[in-house]
Amino acid sequence: MGAMRWNKLGKIFDPTHYKLPNDCVQFAQAPQALVFDDFVRVYFSTRAVDPGNGKYLSHIAFVDLRKNLREVIRVSDKTVIPLGGLGCFDEHGIFPMSVMRHGDAVYAYTCGWNRRVSVSVDTAIGLAISRDDGLTFERIGDGPVLAASLHEPCLVGDGFVKLIGGVFHMWYIFGTGWKKFAADEAPDRTYKIGHAVSSDGVEWVKEEARQIIANRLGADESQALPTVVEIDGRQHMFFCYRHSSDFRKNKERAYRIGHAWSDDLLNWTRDDEEPLIDVTPGDWDAEMLCYPHAFECDGAVYLLYNGNEFGRHGFGLAVLER
C-alpha cells in the first residue's frame, strides 16, 4: 500500500447562511453522507434553544450537494426526525445520526441525548428507518437499540454501522466515567471506541467494555465518532480524540483526527500519521478537527469533518490522495 495523504478542500457548508428547520441556528456538526446517483445528501446536527431553560436542543437537518461537493442544491426545510418523547433517551437532542442504505430503506443510527442532574448528559443509540429515501425517519421504538450496560455504565453513543459479509458491524463509543478534573469545574466525561455485531441491525451483541483503539494521550484520552471505510482491501477507521479536560478553549488539548487500520475487523493498529490531517493555522480549522466521516463517492474517498468551535460555522472536506 502506497503512502496516503488527505488533501484539504476547504469548508464546504456554513449553516449560518441558511434558514434551518426547528428554529435552529448555527452548528452543522457530525456531517454524514448518503450518496445518490447524482447528488450527495449530508446529514448534520444543528441546534435550537430550548425556550424552557435556554439550553441547546440538537436537531438533525441535511444539505444536498452536487457530486462536485461544492454546490448546494437544497437544505432541508422540514423536520427530518422529531426529538424523543418526555423522559426518553433522545428527549434533548440527536447528535450524530449515521445513515446507511439497507434494501429499499435508509437506516439511521441516532445518538440520543438527555440531560441529567449530577452530570450534564447521558446518551444511547437508537434506530430510525426512512421509507422516503432519507427525507424523514421514523423510530422503530421509543427506546434505544444500544445503551449503557453492566460494564459500560454511561454514555453509549456515536454508532457507525456497516454491513460486511452479511454481518452488521457497529463501532460506537462508551463512557468510562465522569470526574471533576478541577474543583471549580463541572465534571467531564471520558469515552473510548468499542465494537458490536448484529445479524439484523436491531439486536446487538457488544464486545463489552473492550477498548479497541489504543490511547495516544493516556488514560484520560476521549475518543469519539468512529467511521470506517475500505481502502485497497483494508478497513480504515477515522475518529476524533482529545484530552478529557480543558479541551473546549485550549487548542493544544482540543480534538484532532486519529486513524487506525484493521485486516480482521477485530484488531486495530493505530497510525495517526498516515494519512495525517492536521489543523491549518489561521483557518476555520486552526483550533480543532473533530467529528470525521469517511465515505466513497465515484471512486474517490472523502472525509467530512468539523473545525473550530465544534462545527458552529459548518463543515469541510478533504479527499484522499494515494
Image (spheres, helix red, strand yellow):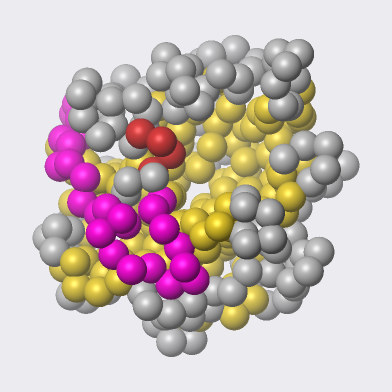
Q: Tell me if residue 299 can be seen.
A: yes
Q: Residue at x 26, y 69 (%)?
A: 64
Q: Position of residue 115 (x, y in %)?
A: 74, 50
Q: Tell me if residue 145 can be seen.
A: no
Q: Is residue 227 above or below residue 191?
A: below
Tell me where residue 121 sits by quadrant: top right
Q: Residue at x 56, y 18 (%)?
A: 246
Asked if the stretch drawn in magenta spans residue 123, the answer is: no
Q: Residue at x 18, y 37 (%)?
A: 8
Q: Position of residue 272 (x, y in %)?
A: 37, 23
Tell me where residue 200 sits by quadrant: bottom right
Asked if the stretch drawn in magenta spans residue 26, the answer is: yes
Tell me where residue 174 sits by quadrant: top right
Q: Position of residue 73 (x, y in %)?
A: 19, 73
Q: Between residues 45 and 57, which one lies in front from this camera angle?
A: 57
Please identify the quadrant where the N terminus is shown.
Answer: top left
Q: Between residues 126 and 280, which one lies in front from this camera angle?
A: 280
Q: Residue furthest right?
A: 150
Q: Position of residue 101 (x, y in %)?
A: 43, 72
Q: Between residues 277 and 250, which one lies in front from this camera angle?
A: 250
Residue range of the region highlighted in magenta in the rendering:
2-28
Relative placement, left or right, of 44 versus 36 is right
Please identify the quadrant where the C terminus is shown.
Answer: top left
Q: Residue at x 27, y 53 (%)?
A: 14
Q: Between residues 47 and 259, which one lies in front from this camera angle?
A: 47
Relative placement, left or right, of 37 versus 127 is left
Q: Is residue 308 above or below residue 38?
A: above
User: How many numbered circles does the render carry?
Assistant: 0
